[in-house]
Image (tube, rainbow, N blue to C red):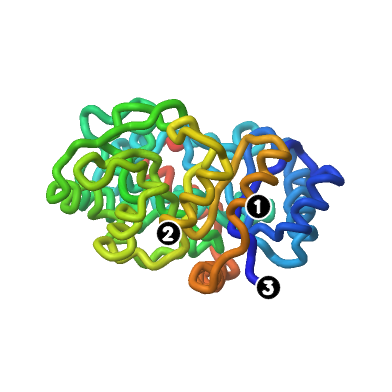
Amino acid sequence: MNFGATILDAEGTRLSAEEKAFFRDVNPFGFILFARNIETPDQIRALCDDFRETVGREAPITIDQEGGRVQRLRAPIWREWMPPLAHVEQAGDQAERAMYLRYRLIAHELRALGIDSNCAPMVDVAVSETHDFLKNRCYGYDPETVSKLGRAVAQGMLDGGVLPVLKHIPGHGRATLDSHYDLPHVSADPALLDITDFAPFRALNDLPMGMTAHLVYDEIDSLPATVSPKMMGVIREQMGFEGLIMTDDISMKALKGDLGELSKAAIEAGCDVILHCNGTLEERKQVAEAAGVMGDVAQSRAEAALAARHEPDSIDIEALEAELDRLMGGKVYG
């Protein structure tokens, strides 16, 4: 049986009986964790076990652990990272290795908890006008640097047995609004976008999973990218991305309308999976019903993504920490 075309969350630190029954029924492709789901290592491992037991398989469990403002695992139990852009700037000409080490250490923390995916690398190319919600999460201001560092981030996680999620396809860097609350519009010429914003996604088009951006590229389509067949064509054909595409959170305020209708529109546009976060159980049911079960093409992409998941390589964590300390000149954590 094909997977449900959703990635869903939990309301608390363990699943309720109602949530277990719901997940068992709709068989979501995977799950996502937030700060409200996190207390202790043992509790997180138990919650991950809950998720997987409901669907009877090793479903992928993802999280936003970029470091800086966007990290769900925090001190004092886990490492507290500085924002990615600050990390890159401090590392200087050692940034590629420093980013690899950073995300290899993050992968080690995630796998110890039963988490086997991370919503990174984020290869949006920053510009001077990039909104503050995004700018210090970026890796740089030119597509070559961003592509190189994005590859290092992805490889660090893959080596640690964690599936990367490339975001935000096809590029969020020019947005001057926060898509959690408003719908950004980008008016740049498509030819310019192709050699700047789109370039890192083309360079990393072999990664197993990607996440959409909720914004409008005015010169390409009037619809937000997540629900735009034209933009999905750009992603698949112009960028050559063949992996599984999930939406960014379908409940973000950038998208207006009924959650069920938005979910259907995203699937019809070409997204493979609907990501839904921070909603009630009834809202999750609404999204799952609208998204339905993966078609055969989406199922093949999902299976290919899961096939990229493997056991972590053998490493000396203390040695990696020491190397990162040297590269960063002392200060590593936020």
The amino acid at mark 2 is Gly
Sequence-wise, the earlier of marks 1 and 2 is 2
Residue found at x 27% / y 45%: 221
Residue 293 sits above or below residue 33 on the image: below
How far is the residue under mark 3 from the one under mark 2?
Answer: 21 Å
Residue 108 lies in quadrant: bottom right
User: Residue at label 3?
Assistant: 1
Question: What x and y, as percent, mark residue 128?
Answer: 21, 29
User: Residue at label 1?
Assistant: 289
Helix, strand or loop at disc 3? loop
Question: What x and y, as percent, mark residue 249?
Answer: 52, 41
Residue 131 sits above or below residue 34 on the image: above
Sequence-wise, the earlier of marks 3 and 1 is 3
Residue 181 sits above or below residue 16 on the image: above
Residue found at x 45% / y 35%: 255
Residue 185 sits above or below residue 22 on the image: above
Helix, strand or loop at disc 2? loop
Residue found at x 63% / y 56%: 30
How far is the residue under mark 1 from the one under mark 2?
Answer: 17 Å
